[in-house]
Every structure is written in C-alpha cells, then in structure tokens.
Amino acid sequence: MARAIWTGVITFGLASVPVGLYTATEDHTVHFHQLQRGTADRIRNRRVNERTGKEVDSKDIVKAFEAAEGEYIVIDPDELDEIAPGRSKAIEISDFVDLADMEPVYFARTYYVAPRGKEHLKVYELLRAALAEADKAGIATFVMRGRQYLTALRAADQVLVLQTLHWADEVRDPGRELPELPSGRAGRGKELDMALQLVDALSAEWEPARYHDTYQEKVRELVKAKAEGRDIALAEEAPEATNVVDLMDVLQHSLDQARSPGGGATEERKKKSAADRPAQKSELRRMSKAELYQQASDQDVPGRSKMTRDQLIDALARAGRRGRKKAA
C-alpha cells in the first residue's frame, strides 16, 4: 500500500474534503554506479567544506542567499516554513478552466488524490463527478516540501488527479528561444492533403500499454550481453532529413506503407478511429457555423441556439470527450 507524500484538504466554495497525495508514476530507468576507470573502486559524492576540505554532516548544513560576493544571509528551514503561503495545508481551488484550453507544456508531475477516510467519499466523488461532467480542471496552489506549486485538479476514472504546473514565467517563448520557425502557416495544397491522409491512416485509439521503453530494454540487453561475453547489434543510423523536392514522393510512399497490411493502424483500431469517433476540436474548426449548429442539434447540445461559432466548437468538443469516456 502506497504512503501519502502530502496530506491536507481540498476546498471548493465552502465545501472541503481531507485528502492525501500519492505519486502516480514510478521510474524504471536502469541506474549505474560510478567507478574509477580500470578499477572496481566506487566514486562517492560528499559534502565538503570548501575552505577546510573536511566533510560536513547534513544536520550542520543551512541554506544561505549570497547578497554580495562573499556575504551570505543565512535562512533557517523553520523560517521558510513560517512564511510559506497556505500553511493551513489546503489546496484551495480558485478557478475552473476548460481542460482543452490548457497547453501540455504547462504540465509537470502527476499525483493521485485520495480521500482520507470513508466518511469523506461522498464529497470527494461529488467533486470528481462535477469535474468530469464539466470537462474542466480546478486551478489551485499549495505548498509541499518548502515550495509552492501551481496545480490543476482533474477527474479521471474513479479518481482525482493533481497535475503540478509550470508557472507562466517558467515556460519559454519558442519565438525567442528557437533559431528557426516557419514564417507562415501551411496553405491548403496537395502536400497538406496527403499529410492529413497519412495522419488519418496512422490514427488509433490511445492505448498506453502498446508503448514501451525500448531504450531501457536495449540497456538491459547490453548489460546481460557484456556479462556473458557476447556482442550486441548496433542501432541503426538516424534517417536523413527529407529534401523538399522529394516531399511528395516521401509522403506518397509513407501513405502506401501505412495503408499496407501491418503498416499502419490495424483494422480493429481503424474502426475506432476518424470516421467513428466524435470530431476533434481541430476538425470542428474547419466547419462552418451552420455545420456546427447541425452537429449540435444532432447531439442535443443545450443552449446551442444562442451560441457563437467558438462556443459551438467548445460545446461539441466537450460532448465528444464525454461520449468517448462513456464508450470506454
């Protein structure tokens, strides 16, 4: 049984529920020790006093801010706790936002949230069900281990999930950070049409278990082979960049390969893909308002007659996500 790494309460409006936070993922990376080359001698990292060269016990180490060269302001851990926002250990939801509007670049780590006691199950499930039905995330801040986190609380199947988020000033602007970016959008043409066909041919339902870390498998295979005195096959070279002149040929060959037996999505997965699933937001944006309204009428979206085009897109996207969850 997992142990909570943080305990407190979630509040929304005047309602609150005591919860515990649990790590949602685990690391399966192959870890190595460091040795001095040519020996079996382990390399150790030690905390050493820069002036005396002597090792220092962790209980004698404090935090300090360098105000000027050689001048430090020492900060005690208790002083950091005293000024920490949210010392009441509460995750107070301040806003509810559409999940579809949250860019993935803001998401950091994922945690499961569990109620602390059977008597709190009803309030916990009420919040989970409301978030699931509205397809929204609750935005909140909380403090853990001397650091304040911006978070998004969202509903998964039977459980609430807390995602820590990067603060806005931590997310870099690609326009300023990257050396080259397209100067304009790709216009409608044969290349884009064929690229869309390729995307459609390779479309499938999201099934996480289908994907696995092949690099870690190769690392374990390398360790085993070296222990047994065997050679191991080298990895293939990375493919060369596609020449713009050959783009149409490359796309056509890719499309032919994807459509060949075993080349792309299986027949079973294809049945679940584009034609049979509700429209995604990107597909909805290509439709006229009349087409959007017709879809909203077919799906009996409430309030559709008063909606703008953008509101119809949002409402249909939410209805599609709810439909996929029910089908699953």
Image (cartoon, rainbow, N blue to C red):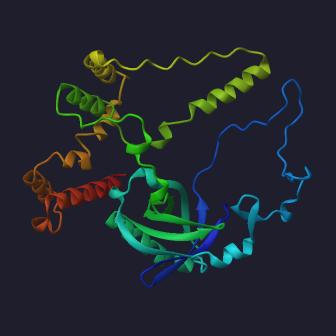
Q: Is residue 159 visible?
A: no
Q: Between residue 39 and residue 16, name the one nearer to us.
A: 39
Q: Position of residue 327 (x, y in %)?
A: 33, 52
* Relative vertical location of residue 170 with respect to residue 75 in this rendering, above or below: above
Q: Between residue 328 and residue 156, name the one nearer to us.
A: 156
Q: Quadrant of residue 28?
A: top right
Q: Position of residue 160 (x, y in %)?
A: 48, 65
| Residue located 72% across and 38% down the image | 31
In the picture, measured across the screen, residue 133 lies left or right of residue 17, that is left
| Residue located 79% across and 37% down the image | 33
In the picture, measured across the screen, residue 243 lies left or right of residue 147, that is left
- Residue lying farthest to the front in this orientation: 69
* Relative vertical location of residue 315 with respect to residue 285 in this rendering, above or below: below
Q: Is residue 25 visible?
A: yes
In the picture, measured across the screen, residue 72 lies left or right of residue 158, that is right
Quadrant into which the N terminus falls: bottom right
- Residue lying farthest to the left in this orientation: 290
Q: Please count the marks in the image.
A: 0
Q: Between residue 103 and residue 134, name the one nearer to us.
A: 103
Q: Position of residue 115 (x, y in %)?
A: 55, 72
In the picture, measured across the screen, residue 282 lies left or right of residue 133, that is left
Q: Position of residue 8 (x, y in %)?
A: 59, 75
| Residue located 22% across and 45% down the image | 283
| Residue located 25% across and 50% down the image | 281
Q: Quadrant of residue 188?
A: top left
